[in-house]
Amino acid sequence: MFSWLWVWLWVATAVLLPAEAWGTTFKVALVGPWTCDPMFAKALPDLAARLAMVRINKDPRINSGYWYDYTLVSEDCRSSRALARFAELKGYGHAYYGPFNPIVCSAAALLTKNWHAGLLSPGCLDPGTHEPVDDNSYNGPMRPRGAYTTFGRPLPLSAHVLFQVFRFFRWAHVGVVSAQTDLWEATGQELASALRALGLPVSVVATMEADDEGPQRALNAIRETDAVKGK
């Protein structure tokens, strides 16, 4: 997840930020469910960020004479609290990596725009959140426009990647199964919406509880849909 973090932090400094945001130290706030979600906790975000900053600070081709630092901010796995928490993060960094909850994404993009800070979020799954500028007078990388002028995607849109995989294997129907938490349910619903917008019929969006019977109940929900019933 974070092996390319240093590249995207450099993109944020080069593309997304207004000139007045620059200073001697450039701080990045890493916002994610580091403590409430087991999968993200295993990513060792503090260690990964520390290694990324060491690499950036040692390479003058990337740091352009600035010193880079980071702040690790825990995002709540409950959507309402995650949104309230992000609204309190003004001044935590010149750029923000996160949040990972797609429900929080639009509000976070508007907040960071108001704070004159960059936002790079792999959790923003709506294809319409970021659009490239078609401007021949601009010779640099693609930059955002519209309401989310300081937002950028650190990774290709997941729905587009999955769409290419499904098209290659000629899979016509898709089901989405997520864990039964606010974070993953929101991710599942947003991913399903994005895939439907691309023309893929998502026949079922199911959640799977963490107990012993959770996988069986999720499988039963999938079997009961018209697209896979009896198969």
Image: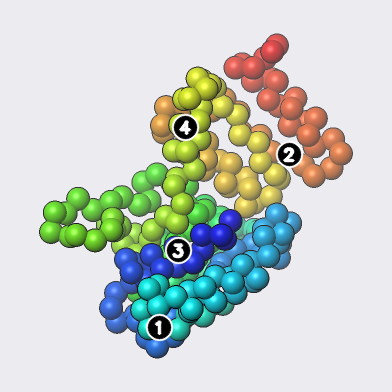
Badge 2 vs badge 4, beta-carbon distance below 8 Å: no
Identify which residue, 78 or 154, lies in the foreground: 154
Residue 208, numbered circle: 2
Give the residue number, with chain letter if any, for mark 1.
Answer: 66
The answer to whether residue 92 is above or below residue 210 is below
**Which amino acid, by three-letter code, is at mark 2?**
Met
Give the mark toward the camera: 1 or 4.
1
* Crowd band around label 4 with a 10 angstrom C-alpha radius: few (<14), some (14–19), many (20+): some
Label 2 vs 1, first from the N-terminus: 1
The answer to whether residue 169 is above or below residue 18 is above
Q: Residue furthest right?
A: 212
Give the residue number, with chain letter if any, for mark 3.
Answer: 7
**Which amino acid, by three-letter code, is at mark 4?**
Phe
Rendered location of residue 43, percent (x, y):
67, 60
**Which amino acid, by three-letter code, is at mark 1?**
Tyr
Identify which residue, 156 or 112, lies in the foreground: 156
Cα distance, mark 1 to mark 4?
A: 40 Å
Badge 2 vs badge 3, beta-carbon distance below 8 Å: no
The residue sitting at 70% across, 54% down in the picture is 39
Residue 163, numbered circle: 4
Q: Is residue 184 left or right of residue 208?
A: left
Cα distance, mark 3 to mark 1?
A: 15 Å
